[in-house]
Amino acid sequence: MHIGIFLAPYQRHSGAGEYYHHLIWELTVPNNGLHYTVFLPSDADRSAEEHLPGVTCVRTRVPSSPALLRHAATVLSRVAARHRPALDLLHCVNTPMPLFGGPTVLTVYDLREEDLPETHGAFHNAFVKATRPGALRRANRVIAISRFTAARLAVHYPACVSKTRIIPLGCVASAGGDMTQPPHPRPYILTVGHLRPHKNHQRLIRAFNALASQDDFPFDLVVVGRNDLGEAFMREEAGGCHPLGRIVFTGEITEGEKAAWYRHASLFVFPSLYEGFGLPLLEAFAAGVPVAASDIPIFRELYGLEKALFNPRDPEAIARTINVMVLDNDLRRRSLAAGAEITATYTWPRMAERTIRVYQELVNG
């Protein structure tokens, strides 16, 4: 069986990027007679092929950015269709989908444009809503990365229910980084995720500022991720911390550096308003760090430790939960015990095995 995988956009440091890189790595491990052709955007970095060993890579004319051009170029792209005689199936890891003319699988991460439109621009929302329904109609199988995403698909696109398969993401402990030398001189609380509206850094920072004003609160806050909110956010929110320097923004960092930040954190906080899955939660548990997280559907699905969950729209509730989680050793042990079960359940090899079954179900009938 020969599978095509259409990657647009191509990303390394994002939840979607983690998903399809681990998918491809795991798919190519067993000698099971399956072959893969990966279609890359025209502007994928030159190291992309190096990160995707064991597959045939084809560069397309579809760019990763800007998003509008990517969407338009994908809809019109015939590159996968030209490979159709050799391909039994095309797996698209994003919408819209290119022209193909054969069986297709579509992965859906979340439906944030439908559920939380205020976190995107109006033009983006309109374009996604114009292209997603057609992609979902065309797809022969839809992979939802969580029960939550499958439930939201059922609400917004009920015709997809019969062809949706739930295949959760996975996690491995991050490799690399100096695990003996802490990357920060003071104890710290960690959050990981690019600074975007739905990631809710603003309320987390306000909660932290309230805690940092207490003389007996020894922790700093470390924020790992690219700043997509602009310099004004940094001045208005991060600049409000007293004393200055208690909040550290790392920007984008390597996997090894991220591993070191995880390993030495006193607590991981995940304040998102909306997630389709939430890989950093698993990464924190894999590093042996207790977690406090938003009380939203996906974290109840994955985690569900009531006292470790907070109302993400209430900075006071966030602050209270952080304070409890750094002081209550029994709750920290319960968090780690729950994390051990979670990381044993959600693995990349298991995700790949279930994906192969979807391919076989679709091709072999």
Image (spheres, helix red, strand yellow):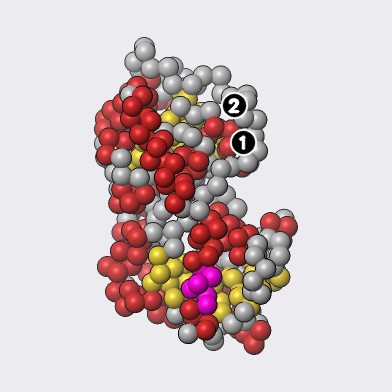
Q: Position of residue 54 (x, y in %)?
A: 71, 65
Type of secondary structure dominating the magenta stretch: helix
| Residue behind mark 1 | 257
In the rendered structure, are the residues bearing label 1 and label 2 in contact, judged by CB atoms less than 8 Å apart? Answer: yes
Boundaries of the magenta span:
355-360
Q: Residue at point 62% right, 24% down?
A: 181
* In the foreground, 122 or 172: 172
Q: Position of residue 205 (x, y in %)?
A: 39, 31
* In the foreground, 105 or 227: 105
Q: Residue at point 56% right, 77% down?
A: 90
Q: Which numbered dot is residue 63?
A: none
Left or right: where 254 falls relative to 222: right
Q: Residue at point 48% right, 79% down?
A: 361
Residue 55: within the magenta? no
Amino acid identity at mark 2? Pro
Q: Earlier in the sequence, mark 1 or mark 2?
A: 2
Measure how far apart labels 1 and 2 are at the Cα level: 8 Å
Left or right: where 231 falls relative to 34: left
Amino acid identity at mark 1? Glu
Question: Is residue 9 in sight in this rendering?
Answer: no
Q: Residue at point 43% right, 72% down?
A: 142
Question: Is residue 188 in sight in this rendering?
Answer: yes
Choose top left, top right, bottom left or bottom right for residue 33.
Answer: bottom right
